[in-house]
Image (spheres, rainbow, N blue to C red):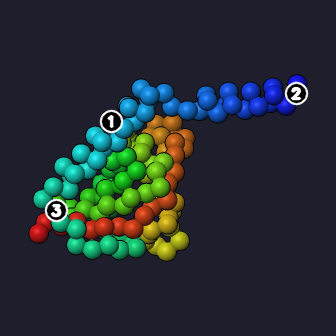
Amino acid sequence: MFRPMMILAASAALAGCAQTPAQTARAAAAAAADQAELGRQLKGLAPVGERSCLPTLPSTMQVEAYGPTLLYTAGPGQKYRSDTTGGCESIARGDILVTVSNSGSTCRGDISRTVDRTGRFPTGSCSLGSFVEYRKP
């Protein structure tokens, strides 16, 4: 009697974690919108190479999130794309991205975390991917 109750409880817990069809559709629509906006941000730019670390860039560099992809804008006509493991998407709503690196540069594999701008509490984290540089041709 105890074993069937445990199985029922476990399956109920797992079912509670599953997304509804409406939630799945909203997530797919949001992902498609993120990819479309990323495409618009990179329009007119061409990939020129991939690197493990970002070069030393001005402190005014902006970073934006499009789903799990981070886009660093170094200046007019120069951007760097990093596909992360996901978890840093909250910078799209204004959270701060904090990256600590042991190498002195922001590099593939570094862990970035996001922090709420007003409350200063952690909101997420991700591992950075390689950096693809985009420039005007």
Mark 3 = which residue? 45
Question: Label 2 to label 1, Cα distance in Å?
Answer: 43 Å
Are the residues flagged by discs 3 and 1 in contact, CB closer than 8 Å?
no
Q: Amino acid at mark 1?
A: Ala
Q: Residue at x 40, y 50 (%)?
A: 68
Counting from the top left corner in percent of width and height, residue 46 is at: 18, 66
Q: Secondary structure at mark 3?
A: loop
Q: Image quadrant of residue 71?
A: bottom left
State which mark lies toward you, 3 or 1.
1
Q: Is residue 61 left or right of residue 100?
A: left
Question: Could you tell which of marks 3 and 1 lies nearer the N-terminus?
Answer: 1
State which mark lies toward you, 3 or 2.
2
Mark 1 = which residue? 29
Counting from the top left corner in percent of width and height, residue 34 is at: 30, 44
**Vertical side of 26 occupied by 132: above or below:** below
Question: Label 3 to label 2, Cα distance in Å?
Answer: 62 Å
Dot label at residue 2: 2
Q: Secondary structure at mark 1?
A: helix
Q: Residue at x 28, y 47 (%)?
A: 35
Total marks shown come to 3
Crowding near pointer 1: few (<14 within 10 Å), some, many (20+)?
Answer: few
